[in-house]
Image (spheres, rainbow, N blue to C red):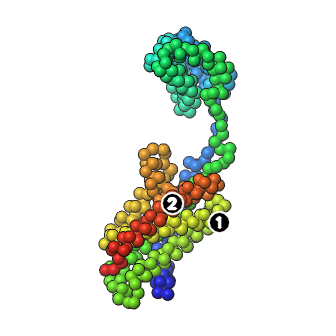
Amino acid sequence: MSLWIIAKYEVLRMFRMRYVMAIQFVMPLLLIFILGSALSGAFKVEDRTIKPVKVDVVQGDSGALKSSMEGFLHSPDLGNLIHTSTVQTRDQAVKRLKSGVSEFALIIPDDFSARVMAGKEAEWEMIFGNNYEQNLTAEMVLRSFLDNVNQRQAIAIATGSEAAASTQNQGSSEHVAAPAASHVKLGNLATNNSQYSAMQYYAASMLVMFLLYSGLSTAMTLQGEKDKHTLSRLNAMPIHESTILLGKVLGNAFIAICQAAVIVGTTVIVYHVDWGKSYGLLALICFFVVVASMSLAVLTALIVKSSKGISTIFQMVVLTMSFLSGGFTPLPDGFLRQIGEFTLNYWAMQSMYRIMLGSETSVLAHHLLVLGCISGGLLLVSFIVYRKAGYHE
């Protein structure tokens, strides 16, 4: 009974602190609206028609690969990607590129085939135009042929030039007949419309971040009892200190659950955010985040001995995890994104996105399992630290 009384009065005390309620309930809704509205254009995925690129080709090579190259460059299947024109010299190609007659230039050296068949280093010269997208289109198409050439060159290095020539003669007719089918494949990225909106993205990221911030209120409450010297009075009562700690944690956990319900409900009704069809799994994700938040609160309150230190450390941890997980803006592939996969925010947010997009059960189960393990690990560590440190002045 004492446990629930402590939890009840903790809830009443927190609801009377208007600034805390404003930060936990109003602030996340404002941030979701501002970020979701301002960055909505950055999350749109649209299929775009590729404009054929005018490519000037200076063919200086007359070796064994010439027929394959010409068959590839003049293939009708590549007509919707590149339009090639033959010019005599590099200077002429550069002049046409500067004048706007062409949009890309390809220079094939006269010893290209010989160097490839001998297993030596060989390369094409590509001269870019002014349009980035057209440059990218032409480069990707042309490099698809070079990938095939690299394979032949590897054969030449490993088995000798005669084996490479045999491979060239065997595959040249097939390569000329259907070069585009083996090198280039067009598709539609937005056919299934499997992309979340900016409002969905920031609804999930802000929900996770502010659920973690609820742990800061818990840690400050636990430390406040020490600063006001009321904890010694509570410990003097016939109540175990674990009951006092657990009661305060349960009271703040209840407020965090109410916070999650308000954020989800308001974003659905007011912002028309689609959270997916499985609100049960969404509630489970929020429960894991609340458990992790309360565990971090207990750890911080037991290890750090001042309110200022608790506030500084807790905010740094939450903000760092939010940034590394892409909570403020999606991060590109790279080192930062790899680090973000070690954060609680990442797995919580990705679990919510999987629900929004209706992903397969196995994918969602994987994310939930990792999130549950992180939350359970933090809970276990906080229990071990409590057994050693205790909650007393």
342 or 262: which is nearer to us?
Answer: 342
Q: Is residue 227 above or below residue 318?
A: below
Marks 1 & 2, CB-CB < 8 Å contact: no
Check disc 2: other Cα within 10 Å, few if <14, some if 14-19, many if 20+: many
- One can see residue 29 in this view: no
Quadrant (top left, top right, bottom left, bottom right) of the C terminus = bottom left
Q: In the rendered structure, which disc, 1 or 2, sits on the residue that comes first in sequence?
A: 1
Please state the horizontal and vertical placement of residue 161, each as a whole percent of the image. 50, 14
**Which residue is rendered at x = 54% and y = 56% of the image?**
367
- One can see residue 320 in this view: yes
- Judged left or right of residue 199, residue 243 is left
Q: Is residue 262 above or below residue 339?
A: below
Check disc 1: other Cα within 10 Å, few if <14, some if 14-19, many if 20+: few
Assign a secondary structure to mark 2: helix
**Which residue is rendered at x = 36% and y = 78% of the image?**
391
Q: Disc 1 marks which residue?
A: 269
Q: Is residue 338 above or below residue 121?
A: below
Dividing the picture into quadrants, the one containing residue 277 is bottom right
Q: Disc 2 marks which residue?
A: 371
Q: Residue most toward the front?
A: 159
The amino acid marked with disc number 2 is: Leu
Q: Is residue 43 above or below residue 58?
A: below
373 or 312: which is nearer to us?
Answer: 373
**Which residue is rendered at x = 53% and y = 24% of the image?**
151
Q: Determine the CA span between mark 1 and mark 2.
A: 28 Å
